[in-house]
Amino acid sequence: MNISRYFLIILLLIMSKQVISQNDIDSEDEPQSTLNEAVSDTLAKPTPDSFVRIGFDLSAVARQFFEPEVRQFEFSLDSEVYYNWFAIFEGGFANVRATERPFDYNAQTYFGRIGADYNLLPRTGTDKNNSLSLGIRYAYGLSTHEASNFLIRNDYWGDSDGNLERTNFHLHWIEFSGGLKTEIFQNFYLGWMIKTRVRIFESRNPELTPYYLGGYGHEKRRAPVMIHYYILYKLNFN
């Protein structure tokens, strides 16, 4: 009986020692594997997606209901060049036709912007294609405008009329922007963006000041803030 008791005690001690030893091995392996995974995650740098996204500015068309004298069309192209960094190109044209006294005003404007956006959102889960971005752009606009049939009334010198010939107006500006793009269907996006514009250089025509500059807004606004709404489609190359 005593021998059986001693044998059972020795067997329990051996089994306990084996369990403790196995736990020590597991505890040593787990941090090592976790460390390896962390190192792997650190070394595995995310790569940018290969795509071009085409956008159309809906707000430019909607503006015609409030300002029928201005017709503007604007599109955009963007692509991810580095992880969460997107190269941006925007461009378009505008026609302005105002037939109110004291003159008739006509203008054609062509404009372009180039810059970059940075996405602030993590690219994980089902929302990986959405973005909340901040951006900067350099922009240039060329406006060709003229005023015909102007009439200036003066009781002392008398009335005068005539035409101001077609001239060019150049404007360079910087844009700062922030906005959101959301994928509503596969590869289809809706987005909005708030932009503020700061002039850096412009040409001056002492006889005629532009009424509206395509891509910029009304000439009298020195730093306009505008909201743009977009519909976009993504072309994948993966």
Image (cartoon, rainbow, N blue to C red):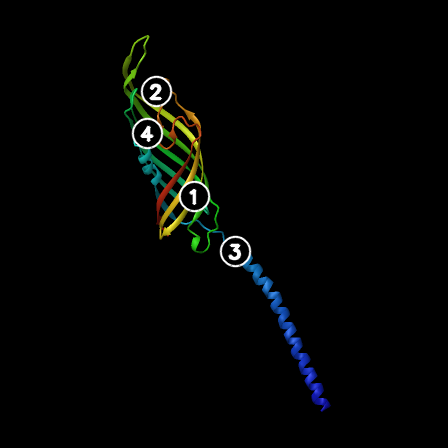
Q: Alpha-carbon neighbours of circle 4 within 10 Å: few (<14), some, or many (≥20)?
A: many
Secondary structure under badge 4? strand
Which one is nearer the viewer's eye here, 118 or 194? 194
Q: Residue at x 33, y 27 (%)?
A: 143
Amino acid residing under circle 4 = Thr
Residue 179 occupies quadrant = top left
Q: Alpha-carbon neighbours of circle 2 within 10 Å: few (<14), some, or many (≥20)?
A: some
Decide which of tag 4 and tag 3 comes sooner along the chain. Answer: 3
Tell me how far mark 1 sits from mark 3, CA to CA.
Answer: 23 Å
Q: Are marks 1 and 3 in contact (CB under 8 Å)?
A: no
Decide which of tag 3 and tag 2 comes sooner along the chain. Answer: 3
Q: Position of residue 151 (x, y in %)?
A: 29, 16
Residue 109, numbered circle: 4
Q: Are marks 1 and 2 in contact (CB under 8 Å)?
A: no
Residue 37 occupies quadrant = bottom right
Q: Position of residue 208 (x, y in %)?
A: 34, 20
Amino acid residing under circle 1 = Phe
Residue 208, numbered circle: 2
Amino acid residing under circle 3 = Asp
Rendered view: 1 above or below 224: below
Q: Alpha-carbon neighbours of circle 1 within 10 Å: few (<14), some, or many (≥20)?
A: many
Secondary structure under badge 3? helix
Q: Position of residue 24 (x, y in %)?
A: 64, 69
Q: Which residue is mark 3?
A: 41
Decide which of tag 1 and tag 2 comes sooner along the chain. Answer: 1
The residue mark sitting in front, 3 or 2, is: 2
Q: Which residue is mark 1?
A: 86
Instruction: Report the residue that reaches farthest toward the front.
Output: 155
Tell me how far mark 2 sits from mark 4, CA to CA.
Answer: 15 Å
Decide which of tag 2 and tag 4 comes sooner along the chain. Answer: 4
Tell me how far mark 3 sits from mark 2, CA to CA.
Answer: 61 Å
